[in-house]
Amino acid sequence: MKTTFAPPMTGSLNIHNFYIGKLKAKQEQLCETDPELAMLLDNVAAVLSEHAVTFAEDIADMEDDETCDHSP
């Protein structure tokens, strides 16, 4: 039985990673001119990173479950 939740979760993981990269790049640009905003962006990137780790773990668990479901 193929899991239907993996593709949307994989897409969410990709979106999280995309925005984490964008936030970190902007944070580096603002580091000298607006350190408070740079710190805020860094905090947002950290939260998104935590969510990305959770998504990655969930995807791995689903893939493991799918593998176990097909074992003889």
Image (tube, rainbow, N blue to C red):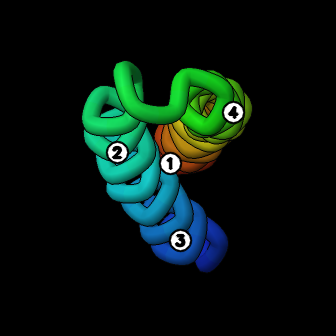
Q: Sequence-wise, which precedes: disc 4 or disc 1?
A: 4
> Which one is closest to the eye, mark 4 or mark 3?
4
> Which one is closest to the eye, mark 2 or mark 3?
2
Q: How far apart are marks 2 and 3 (CA)?
A: 39 Å
Label 4 close to label 1 by CB (< 8 Å): no
Q: What residue type is labelled 3?
A: Lys
Q: How far apart are marks 3 and 1 (CA)?
A: 10 Å
Residue 72 showing in the rendered view: no
Task: Decide: is 38 above or below 11.
Answer: above
Q: How far apart are marks 4 and 3 (CA)?
A: 40 Å
Q: Which amino acid does label 1 sit on?
A: His
Q: Residue at x 47, y 73 (%)?
A: 7
Q: What residue type is labelled 4?
A: Leu
Q: Could you say which is closer to the camera, residue 59 or residue 3?
A: 59
Label number found at residue 2: 3
Q: Sequence-wise, which precedes: disc 1 or disc 2?
A: 2
Residue located beneath label 2 in the image: 26
Q: Distance between the residues labelled 1 and 2?
A: 45 Å
**Residue 8 in the figure: left or right of residue 30:** right
Where is residue 62 shown, x and y percent of the image? 62, 45
Residue located beneath label 1 in the image: 70
Q: Could you say which is closer to the camera, residue 71 or residue 46?
A: 46
Q: Which amino acid does label 2 sit on?
A: Lys
Where is residue 55 shown, x and y percent of the image? 63, 42
Q: Which residue is drawn at 43% across and 45% down?
A: 23
> Which one is closest to the eye, mark 1 or mark 2?
2
Residue 43 showing in the rendered view: yes
Q: Which residue lies furthest to the front in this view?
A: 33
**Residue 58 in the figure: left or right of residue 9:** right
Q: What element carries label 3?
A: loop
Residue located beneath label 4 in the image: 40
Crowd band around label 3 with a 10 angstrom C-alpha radius: few (<14), some (14–19), many (20+): few
